[in-house]
Image (cartoon, grey):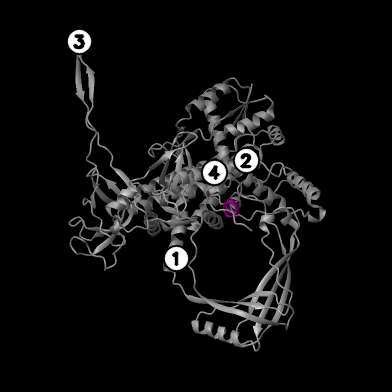
Amino acid sequence: MKLLIVESPAKAKTISKYLDGAYEVKASVGHVRDLPKSNKKAIDVELGFIPHYEISKGKEHVVSEIQALAKNADEIILATDPDREGEAIAWHLAELIKEAKVKTKNIKRVTYQEITKEAIEEALKHPREIDMNLKLAQEARRVLDRLFGYDLSGLIWKKVRYGLSAGRVQSPALRIIVEREREIKAFIPEDYWTISGEFKTEKKVNLSLICEEEPRQEKEAERILSEAKNKEWNIVDIKETKVKRAPKAPFTTSTLQQAASSRLGFTPSRTMGIAQKLYEAGHITYMRTDSVSLGAQAVLSISTFIEKEYGKENLTVRTFKTKSKNAQEAHEAIRPTHVEKENAGSNDDEKKLYRLIWQRTVASQMSDADVLRTKILANIHGATIPAFSANGSRTLFPGWLLADPDAKGDDVELPKVSVGESVDLISIEAQAKQTQPPSRYSEAGLVKELEKRGIGRPSTYASTIKTIIDREYVEKIGSALKPTDTGEVVSTFIENNFAKYISDEFTAEMEDELDDIALGKAQYIRTLKNFYTPFTKDIKEQEKSEKATNLGEADPKFKCPKCGGSMIIKLGRGGKFLSCSRYPECDGALMMDGTEIKKDEPIGLHPETGEPIFVKVGKYGPYVQLGDGSATEKPEEIPVEVQEGKKKKKISKPKKIKPKMASIPKEKPLSEVTVADALVYLSLPRTLGTHPESGKIITANIGRFGPYVAHDGNFRSIKIPESPYTIELSKALELLAQEKKPRGFAKKKK
């Protein structure tokens, strides 16, 4: 019997079909071993950073099955993913097989870029040994991340707040988001005016023109308006420029995440999950890659397809070179495995992402598009004001846009005019505006920035962003990433005390060193020692520093509500708040907007139950609470057997009943929350009625992603003007009948 081991059951199923029973194909279901959660026994630093692995929780039965199959196998093929993680999984599997005292020595490794019959058969012709350099590079990253994370997180627990954490790539990513937020807060807007006019040509065709300059003074804007209204206009110049639009390179991991965000509204983690399924089904090549190159056979297939479908005039074979200084092993770009298959995937999301990959791949080997760009300039006689202009474009030769029409944009046709021609001013207006601060990063924008700075790897971007969101260091406002109070405090602490270790230069250089280990140019122990020796010294130095509980003095206008003293800014579970500077002698506290935080004073009583209602601030923000938490369930009488068949009744301890809580909407000032408001908030989740078909309950509630209605595990968002507090059953049924839309941006209509 021949045994072939891969990571996922889906991949195992696909490969089994290609091998016609020649191999028993078994899935390890990802990693089978990892470092233990306890850091004390995870890594032996003194003996050379030796990691101590244990079988991952829940994987014991998988390991036992693989070991049992291995004992009866004449040949064992480790066919995990073609990257460092895949190499590490292969090594761990080999070690576990050896631990089971399997006699066979014929354990080999094979790799492939795509899961097709041809690729698998070719890979099996070229088995090799496990690449220990790749395995060591992965191990070095894992050990490095553990040492950095545990040691620095432990210090943050002591100096800032228990439960917070840091990470080698996570912390630089958070710093980038926090730095942008500081830019936004420091931004001082400036006034400016945009001036636009509506004109008619000599042929009575409408022409819209915009002032080339945006005056910063209202007086200048008024002068331009006055001159424009009182003088004759004519066309002063017409500029026509023929430009070529070249196609972009095929997708890497990061560019796929960016394009899927802008075109489809997918988050990076969602994109990678969909791509994984497409890869495992054999539709696309491996989706974790820094490379933009295409294999010779792939280029030949794509060229044949283009010539047949679009004509020889649209074929231009191109070779793209990888620009990323941190590019990993020689992978191909992400592409369809069979270019003649224009659509693939088992659901709507998979079909959309596959189509995006297909379009980019085919377009990359097609001719440039020729576009004619036209600019019309007009001014008054004497030209005492800036010129007004209109821009248009027209596609002369579509080229690669035939394969990717979504990238084309709309042609803007301008009316036919000639230099010197008079135009009549119909109307003109100036609109006052203000300059805007830089935008917050979207997830795709952060991926682009991380790649540009050389921080992390394609395979880490999605998980890094997910981590800082899950740990509530960052919140998503629409598509924008905004640091929370906790995120700002943690980042500031690390920047002030460990700036070197989260700098762009240090993080990128460390990635380069891990690359060198993979290439056999650097040593595992020396690399880790060069990092860890000064790092532990810096950690010990900071152990002596004071606890970072005081985040600065509050605005003098805020006074302690109890003693009238000054206030200081502190970090609590719910974010920043103002504490009396005399704490613990005085426990007066305010929210950042000046609202007093009252601990045990109810805003009123429930009109039916008489229970007190409180306004509180917790880990997830302000909320109302019904009851003081002292209510208990009725004690149970439990019969207990005693000697000689006699029974004795034992009274159980009364259990406390958790009080009902409900979030307060962000826009509602806490000082204005009334009992009536609280009763509305506490009404959630609301039972709206039963579904006419299933007979199951339909409810309305507010969750992590906003208000929604739910029925039998099926959810639909509630949009304004509807509200979870007032929505009726009929409207809920309408929403549930609609096709479920993916989270993210709606695709813009052309």
Q: Amino acid at mark 2?
A: Leu
Q: Amino acid at mark 4?
A: Ala
Query: Which badge, 2 or 1, comes first in the chain's sequence?
Result: 1
Image quadrant containing the N terminus: top right
Q: Secondary structure at mark 3?
A: helix
Query: Which badge, 2 or 3, comes first in the chain's sequence?
Result: 2
Q: Which residue is mark 2?
A: 278
Q: Secondary structure at mark 4?
A: helix
Please provide percent x and percent y for residue 638. Answer: 23, 22
Where are the magenta residues, as a range?
Answer: 257-264
Report the disc number at residue 644.
3
Mark 3 and mark 4 residues within 8 Å of each other at the beta carbon: no
Q: Which residue is mark 1?
A: 184
Q: Secondary structure at mark 2?
A: helix
Q: Which residue is mark 4?
A: 137
Mark 3 vs mark 4, foreground winner is: 3
Tell me if residue 552 comes above or below residue 123 in the rendering: below
Q: Is residue 263 magenta?
A: yes
Please provide percent x and percent y for residue 637. Answer: 22, 24
Query: Which badge, 1 or 4, comes first in the chain's sequence?
Result: 4
Mark 1 vs mark 3, foreground winner is: 3
Number of numbered discs present?
Answer: 4
Give the CA distance from mark 2 to mark 4. Answer: 27 Å
Mark 1 and mark 4 residues within 8 Å of each other at the beta carbon: no
